[in-house]
């Protein structure tokens, strides 16, 4: 492995993205089952994995910048073309593919969350009494309606 090279921690990045994919798949199962307790337990794991991945990407970007390349994903492509092996390139492409898969799975999970929220809000709305336009609560706590438009005054 290239010491201090942008590729140095890529295996660890791949391990983390695979772990994140597993968490996202688990999250999707819990969302479909509306299993709130298990969903809540996944959130810290997901956040931790994303944080670790971000730290490794920052290290990779720093290494790219130190090597005279753009300190972002596009710089990685150029570095690989100039200095990487075919194995390095294959690993990078795997990480990119798995990252795309994770983004798509996360997007789908977000849609499921929105659907669950919508269903919950609909159920809550169904439990509320029908809305009475202009209804106000009087001193006794009973609902009374606004009576100013009941008719006209003859004078």
Image (cartoon, grey):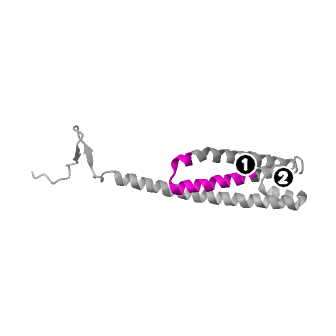
Q: Is residue 70 magenta?
A: no
Q: x%, y% of residue 63?
A: 84, 48
Residue under the image location 58 percent in, 60 percent down: 108
First along the sequence among labels 2 and 1: 2
What number is the disc on residue 18? Answer: none
Magenta residues span 15-40
Q: How many residues crowd mark 1 within 10 Å: few (<14), some (14–19), many (20+)? A: many
Magenta run includes residue 23: yes
Q: Is residue 55 left or right of residue 39?
A: right
Mark 1: which secondary structure? helix
Q: Estimate the x, y position of residue 109 in percent, counting from the top left.
A: 58, 57
Residue holding disc 1? 53
Left or right: 6 as drawn, with respect to 128: right
User: What kind of secondary structure does the magenta stretch mostly adopt?
Assistant: helix
Q: Residue furthest top?
A: 139
Other-residue count near label 2 (Cα within 10 Å), few / some / many at <14 / 14–19 / ≥20: many
Q: Is residue 67 left or right of residue 110?
A: right
Q: Residue at x 73, y 61 (%)?
A: 97
For residue 106, which quarter of the picture?
A: bottom right
Q: What residue does disc 2 label?
A: 7
Who is closer to the viewer here, 148 or 91? 91
Callout 2 secondary element: loop
Label 1 near label 2: C-beta < 8 Å?
no
Query: 58 or 40: which is nearer to us?
Result: 40
Measured in 3D between alpha carbons, the distance from the residue under mark 2 to the one under mark 1, in whole angstroms, is 14 Å
What residue is drawn where x is 86% and y is 47%?
Answer: 66
Q: Based on the displayed image, in which of its 4 quarters is residue 86 positioned?
A: bottom right
């Amino acid at each position: 492995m290239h010491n201090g090279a942008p590729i140095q921690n890529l295996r660890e990045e791949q391990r983390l993205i695979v772990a994140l994919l597993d968490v996202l798949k688990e999250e999707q199962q819990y969302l479909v089952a509306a299993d709130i307790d298990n969903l809540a337990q996944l959130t810290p794991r997901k956040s931790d994995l994303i944080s670790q991945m971000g730290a490794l990407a920052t290290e990779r970007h720093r290494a790219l910048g130190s090597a005279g390349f753009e300190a972002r994903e596009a710089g990685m492509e150029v570095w690989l073309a100039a200095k990487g092996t075919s194995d390095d390139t294959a690993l990078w492409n795997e990480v990119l593919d798995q990252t795309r898969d994770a983004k798509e799975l996360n997007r789908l999970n977000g849609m499921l969350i929105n659907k669950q929220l919508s269903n919950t809000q609909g159920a809550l709305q169904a439990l509320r009494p029908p809305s009475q336009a202009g209804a106000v609560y009087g001193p006794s706590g009973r609902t009374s309606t606004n009576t100013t438009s009941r008719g006209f005054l003859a004078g």
